[in-house]
Structures are given as C-alpha cells and as structure tokens.
Image: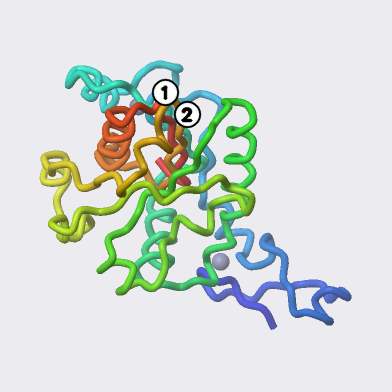
Amino acid sequence: MFECLLCSKKIDVRPNLLLLLTGYVPVRDRLCDACWQTFKEIGPSFCPGCGRTEKKKRYCLDCRKWQKRGMAMIENRALYQYNEEMKDYMARYKFIGDYRLAPIFAGKMRKVIRRRVKEEKIDLILPIPLSEERIAQRGFNQVDAFLPVFAKKVDLLAVKASHKVDQSSKSRSERLRTKQPFELKEGMKEEVSGKHVLLVDDVYTTGRTLYHAAQLLRQAGARKVSSQTLAR
Ligand SMILES: [Zn+2]
Ligand SMILES: [Zn+2]
C-alpha cells in the first residue's frame, strides 16, 4: 500500500487512527529500512572546521587549505556523510524538485539548529540564498524546509545578478576560483553587526559558498559565523 519514496519497495505501515483520519505517515515509514541504512551519520569524531568524519578531531586537509589562504575558519557541523546515496537523495530533492523528500531529514535539521542556537548563543539564522533564476526554475529553496519554525531568519544576502552560472555545472577547481557571489541586501549591515550568525545549507562540498558568505558577514561586522549543513 505504501512505497518507499526512494526505491519504491512496499512498506508495511501499521494502520492507526492518525493514518486513517489524516493519511499522515510518520517520517520513519516513508523510506524502507534498507534505504535508511544507506545514510551514514557523522560520528563523534569530526573535523572542527568543516564537520566531516575524521579519525581524530583536527583540521582536515581541505580546512588547512582555507587556513593557509588566511581565511577565518567557520565551524561547520553536518549530520550525514555525503556518500552516493546522499548525493542521489539531494539530486532528487533539489533538481527533480520532489518535495515529498523534504521531510525526510527536515526534523533532524530543525532539532540540531534549535540546539545550536541555544548552546552557541546564535543570534541569526541565515539560509544560503539561491539566485532568483534558480528559485524560478526550481520553485523552492531546498534549505527552507530545514529551518525551525521560530527561526530568527533574516534575508540578509542576495545572489549578485551577475552571478548566474549554475554552480553544479562547474568543476571543483572552477568553483574554488569563483568570485564573491553574494551581496548584503540594502540596509542589512546593522542587522549583522555584533551578531553570531548561523549559515544553513544542504551540503558542504568545497566550502567555497559558505566561506564567501562568512567573509561578507564578517566584513559587515558579524561577531562570529558558524554553519550547519545536512551533509559533508
Ligand atoms: Zn527504499
Ligand atoms: Zn575540515
């Protein structure tokens, strides 16, 4: 009766009142066990810079490269490893625009963001914006589903109009070379000044996007910039 959203295998969902009345299927029953198991959580040992799984808690090679370039490190934390299955999931969610896939990890992301806001005294939550063309094409920003409802979310950043090239169609080295793609929206400098800002994105790959945003926010006077992604 129910099918796994990813592999279409039949799932036994025990009928209950909520299901009968509203058709609501809990998140754990929307994927089959085999699909759930392909997602690998990031364990207790990770790089303090980008949040990737590491045997020892120290900066990974990628992060040391940012350090060498003289960038102030950001504290990214991620929930899952960016393995093939996670890449597949994101491709279906983002590029095919399968919005049924949004709730799969949304609850966990909201929870971790709420915890970090409290523990790390975060003042502002800032989803990495998409260009207007991209929003028009895709119809949604995939990151919005990850934000807690209460979120003190402010649209501070805009994608510069000149930055139209689709990031995912570029190679890694091309992405690393790109210029600052963001600008601060008008009158937003005051909002940032002295604040601890948490950037939220779906995945940390090269880190370029987050470092660009962080740099802009620091220039505008942010006290600290951290970030949270679903995958690394
Ligand atoms: Zn499945
Ligand atoms: Zn790292």
The quarter holding residue 113 reads: top right
**Residue position marked by numbered label 2 in the rendering:** 196
The answer to whether residue 86 is above or below residue 136 is above
Q: Secondary structure at mark 2?
A: strand
Residue 158: percent from left, percent from top: 29, 52
The quarter holding residue 61 reads: top left
Looking at the picture, which amino acid does disc 2 mark? His
Whether residue 124 sits left or right of residue 129 in the image: it is: right
The answer to whether residue 18 is above or below residue 112 is below
The residue sitting at 24% across, 22% down in the picture is 71
Quarter of the rendered structure image containing ligand 2: top left
Residue 81: percent from left, percent from top: 44, 42
Q: Secondary structure at mark 1?
A: loop
Residue 25: percent from left, percent from top: 72, 71
Determine crowd level at label 1: few under 14, some 14-19, many 20+ residues with C-alpha closer than 10 A.
some
- Nearest to the observer: residue 7 or residue 26: 26
The answer to whether residue 156 is above or below residue 69 is below
Task: Give the total number of marks visible in the rendering.
Answer: 2
Looking at the picture, which amino acid does disc 1 mark? Arg
The residue sitting at 44% across, 25% down in the picture is 194
Contact check, label 1 and label 2, Cβ < 8 Å: yes
The residue sitting at 80% across, 76% down in the picture is 19
- Which comes sooner in the sequence, label 1 or label 2? 2
Where residue 223 is drawn, which disc sits there? 1
Whether residue 196 sits left or right of residue 107 in the image: it is: left
